[in-house]
Amino acid sequence: MQVLVTGGAGYVGSHCAKALAAAGHVPVVYDNLATGNRWAVRYGPFEHGDITDLTRLTAVMDKHRIEAVMHFAALSDVGASTSDPLAYYAVNVVGTHRLLVAMRARGITRIVFSSTCAIYGMAGRSSALGEDTPALPISPYGQSKNTAERMIADSAVWGLGGVALRYFNAAGADEDGEIGEAHEPETHLIPLVLHAAAGLRPDIKIFGRDYPTRDGTCVRDYIHVADLAAAHVQALQRVEPGQFAAYNLGTGSGSSVLEVIDAVRRICGRPVVAIEAARRPGDPPELVADPARAHAALGFTASLTLDDMIESAWRFLVNHGNMDPRRA
Ligand code: UFG
């Protein structure tokens, strides 16, 4: 299939483009490079364009005879969304709306959507989160993704088939070392701890030690980006025009901030200075997926562990110096 991959120059999008190509599809990457990296586009054609540009979207769909869409193009920094919510709604809600208008105009009825556990807000305190957990996002980012999901679900009425994949905490890098996580600025725990291990930063701050968790630090369900990519290809094969489904993608077990730091020390064989700091606003204590539905419907199982995530991300960092292959 010719698959339009919006945001295909970004972290998760670029790994999914590679997985699509490996499965025999043609990923046509559509990205404005605002946060994505041109060097991360290695499979299939690249089309520069903005997700809110309806004319350009339609032209690219025509040029490449697009049959299905994987939609990653979005702003995704939870903290930044609280200081500039309109930017998040513009890209994540208006952008998704334009994409759906273009798809409808061109009769494209299959979409796999990059969603997030952030739509569940504070709901993850006591037990693993299933898909029927009420969506009560606490950030504009989570709300914008929830609204985009809703537009896709409601579009079943004109024949759209949609699968929303709600990721927990994506981590790790491509096993071949070609692509990996390279955000600017970096805010995510695993790459930041690796930067500390590599001496690229003096320390890692632990945001809160007084949470109601096993060691007082936040617990997250880290999932390898290669497992996420495989799930997208599985979802594409199962998306049915006129039907909508949402699946949680996680491993089903969580790691605390302290456990992640200890794992990095062990795997990298380097010291990491950890400093206790205040809680970060908006952080739920615990977010762990119940991935049973994705397993039953998509055949999805997360096969890679936290150690695999840290090892592959460390390899990417070591091979590419400062996490930017252009400067390696
Ligand atoms: N953390 C630290 N120190 C740091 C960075 C992070 O202690 O320097 C902690 C955070 O407080 C959090 C955990 O490490 O408890 C993980 O933080 P990340 O920033 O790596 O990830 P988040 O859980 O905040 O965010 C992820 C995704 C979002 C998604 C969100 C849902 O990156 O896209 O989960 O809550 F929306």
Image: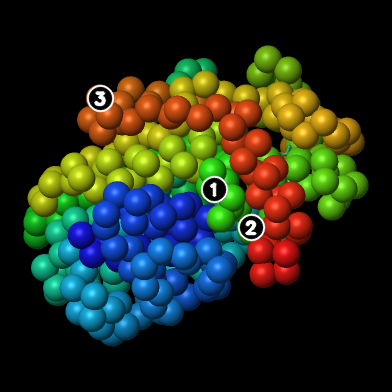
In the visual, does 167 lie left or right of 161?
Answer: right
Q: Amino acid at mark 2?
A: Ala
Please tell me in which quarter of the rendered image ligand 1 is found: top right
Distance, label 1 to label 3, CA atoms, is 29 Å
Left-right relation of 243 to 246? left
Foreground: 179 or 102? 179
Sequence-first disc among 2 and 3:
2
Kindly identify the residue that appears in the image at 33 percent across and 63 percent down: 27
Viewer-proximal residue, 102 or 282?
Answer: 102
Image coordinates of residue 149 in percent, x first then y, are 31, 51
Pointer 2 residue: 182
Disc 2 to disc 1, how far (Cα)?
16 Å
Residue 130 occupies quadrant: top left
Amino acid at the residue labelled 1:
Asp
Name the residue beneath numbered marker 3.
296
| Above or below: residue 216 compared with residue 114 | above
Q: How is the image coloured?
A: rainbow
- Crowdedness near tag 1: few (<14), some (14–19) or many (≥20) residues, C-alpha within 10 Å: few
Which image quarter holds the C terminus?
bottom right
Contact between labelled residues 3 and 1, with CB atoms less than 8 Å apart: no
Answer above or below: position of 152 versus 252. below
The x and y percentages for residue 318 are: 74, 49
Q: Amino acid at mark 3?
A: Ala
- Image coordinates for residue 298, horizontal then vertical, percent: 26, 33
Residue at x 56%, y 68% (from the top left corner)? 39
- For disc 1, the marked residue is 176
Q: Is residue 94 visible?
A: no
